[in-house]
Amino acid sequence: MTAALDQSGTSISDTGFNSTGSTGRAAGLDWDAGLARRTKGLGGGEITAILALAGASDVITFSGGFPDPGTFPTGVLADIAARLIADEPGVALQYSATEGIASVRDYVAGRLAGVQGRTPGGGELMITSGGIDCMELVAKTYLDPGDAVVVEAPTYLGAIMAFRGYEADVRGVPVDDDGMQVDVLAGQLAAGLRPKILYTIPDYQNPTGLTLSATRRTELIALARRYGFLIVEDVAYRDLGFGAEPPPSLWSMAPDVVLQAGTFSKIFSPGVRLGWAAGPAEIISRLVVAKQNSDQCSGALGQRMLEEYGRSGQLDRQLVASRALYARRAELMGKALAAHMPEGTTWTVPEGGFYIWLTAPAGTDTVALSGQARALKVAYVPGRPFYPGDEGAAQIRLAYSRVADDLIDEGIRRIGEVLRTALEER
């Protein structure tokens, strides 16, 4: 880096931060001029906007995929936390092993055996700080600039951000009622696409609510083995089905080519920031090293609270009530959409999870209309951020998970008013 001297003899970099003032002092520096290449143009405003509405009381918000606070076992957790702090401060209030507290990993391994039919082997499981932590660790560990990553189109916008944060070339594969169109992926691979990672949410997907069929799961695994890419399976919503069990998890079917990213944010509490990664031991060991160089370890108090709550059987009992709650709200939203959406609007019918994916008539710009929606005190997330490309202009993600039953119809009526007005003005 070359430098020049100002009149006071202070060194001024001519290739670092640029001065925007007349004095050259720190207050006049242009900090954006020093951004790392990988962060320039990186999004994130959508997630910021979603989280900003977390405490809004004057807006009917369908934007955030938040669990209903009524599912949080506050009284039970208060008792568990008090006991842990009093009886084992050297564990609950201390740093933990990077891969997670041994007893917590044992609990999670046992739970996976019970609900997915497979127990992680030695070194095949670690505790993470939520699902997004796993994606960041994978991206940090395995992606070089320009590496191809395949995602569903649309998919979780946080995953797109995580992969693009390490300069990956993110490619989308379209979805239909049976999930990712694996035949389209097969054609892309035959034509020369060579992804290092394929990211999928096979169960009650974010943002569509769709589920990958059993047949396509088998086909996807065969492609991963043939072309040598890692499947990162996000199971954030797998435990929140409304009826029949989803097909077997990809990880339980193919532990040799699948890394499962799980989270307790949707079924326990997002405030404790806990999840897991299960996959080949060689991969888990690398992710542990990456975590040592990020947040070092997940919070020990939260880990032990989860373990105590889970081992008592209360998590599984709460899940029964949670599923019924979200199933009822999904049904209420479906009825509201049928009553209030303009002609030509379509939407998905989820069998679990938090979301309905709405497609307005062609030519609608849901980004432009979001301000009009906010003026009517209702909020949604436009479709564009969920795609790695330019699609999604006429689409909307609607989260029903946290909207009170008696507000769903009115909120959807307001969104319908916004869409109908826009169509009439064209």
Image (cartoon, rainbow, N blue to C red):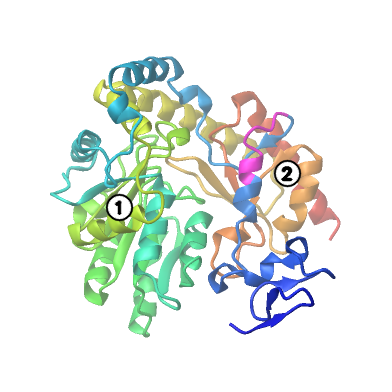
Separation of disc 1 and disc 2 at Cα? Answer: 38 Å
Look at the image and give the residue range highlighted in magenta: 50-57
Q: Tag 2's secondary structure?
A: helix
Which quarter of the image is occupied by the N terminus? bottom right
Q: Position of residue 397 (x, y in %)?
A: 59, 49
Q: Position of residue 193 (x, y in %)?
A: 38, 80
Query: Considering only order in the chain, which callout, 2 or 1, is on the residue closer to the N terminus?
Result: 1
Front position in the image: 400 or 166: 166
- Quadrant of the rendered image containing residue 334: top right
Is residue 245 shown in magenta?
Answer: no
- Quadrant of the rendered image containing residue 299: top left
Nearer to us: label 1 or label 2 = 1
- Residue identified by numbered label 1: 260
Q: Which mark is residue 329?
A: none
- Residue identified by numbered label 2: 416
Q: Position of residue 196 (x, y in %)?
A: 34, 72
Identify residue type, mark 1.
Gln
Residue depicted at x 50% and y 44%: 349
Front position in the image: 370 or 409: 370
Identify whether 208 is placed above or below 89.
below
Identify residue type, mark 2.
Gly
Tell whether 55 sits left or right of 102.
right
Front position in the image: 45 or 180: 45
Residue depicted at x 40% and y 33%: 267
Dot 1 crowding, Cα within 10 Å, few <14, some 14–19, many 20+:
many
Residue depicted at x 70% and y 29%: 57
